[in-house]
Image (cartoon, helix red, strand yellow):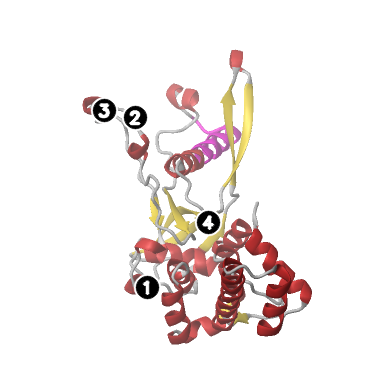
Amino acid sequence: MGKPDTATREYINDSNVFADVFNYFIYDGRKVVDPQNLEKLDASTLLTVFGKEDDEETIQRYRDALKKATLMVDDNAAYIVLGIEAQTHIDYGMPIRTFLYDALQYDSQARELKAAHKNSGDKHSEDEFVSGLYKGDRILPVITVVVHFGAKPWDGATKLSDLYDCKHRESLEFVPEYRMNLIDPAGMTDEDFEKFSTSLGKVLKFMKLSNSRTEMKNLMETDDDYSHIDRNAARVLKECANISLDIDSNEEEIDMCKAWKEEFEYGERNGLILGTVRTARKYGATDEAILADIIAQFNLTEKEAETYLLKESA
């Protein structure tokens, strides 16, 4: 697993961030899912497939985050299974992936019910014995949300039918649809980002604007919240937005404004030096003359200056 995937997975598994995802997506920012009423579930499931002559092969699938939520409805407890998939890149088969994860979770619940009946010795009808499930058995609904931590707009499929290669409409009417739930920062507004109660809104807004230096400069100069963002959120921004940032494990808050300014100034300086090398070569200057010029002009060591000459030669 790459560093961006590790950072985002650890981030969304925080109960406050996890609850924030669903409070935004389902409840428009209202705090209905309580982080204290979340129970972590095993994020791995087993998929059994059959090969030649019914040979079984078991494949283990891992979700990024999976929890059971207890919701209060008219003073009564209601239960639901919630899952999150964090994507740093666009997966063009994502509806199939999430559809499979949800199906495996339902199958896992059914297996648990069957095992409980088998061990209990409860009375059952012939049909209940054959199916393993009893007539009154019920399973918990499963909702999966995909959170895209990339800067460019999600241009992949968002429902299963987007991937079908079939022009026969009459047939498609009988094919069940599966819609993928997606949070994509590129399509969100400033009002949307404000509906989050954790740093997630700031993380997603940062990612949306990260490809525009002008917009990022304005954001870093006007939003003071980024000067004290929590460490896990800063790790996500470091890995997903490629920000050079040293994060001390003892620091609870990170100044992203300062980090971005340093990154911006470094990039500007790099561009200026490379532009100087490029222009000098265009007018026939020797590498020795260029080397001496950029050492003096930009206060570089000889080794640093040679690196810029090599970059411009590549």
Q: Which is more toward the observer, 307 or 179? A: 307
The residue segment tinted magenta is 107-123
Give the percent coordinates (x, y) of residue 200.
Answer: 48, 70
Mark 4, residue position: 88
Q: In this view, does 109 lie above or below 13?
A: above
Kindly identify which numbered label has been placed on residue 195. 1
Find the distance from the CA under tag 1 to the CA under tag 2.
38 Å
Looking at numbered disc 1 in the image, what kind of residue is underneath it? Answer: Lys
Mark 3, residue position: 167
**Where, by quadrant of the figure, is residue 261 drawn?**
bottom right
Looking at marks 4 and 1 on the same chain, the residue that comes earlier in the sequence is marked by 4
Secondary structure of residue under mark 2: loop
Looking at marks 2 and 4 on the same chain, the residue that comes earlier in the sequence is marked by 4
Secondary structure of residue under mark 3: loop
Mark 2, residue position: 165
Q: Which quarter shows the C terminus?
A: bottom right
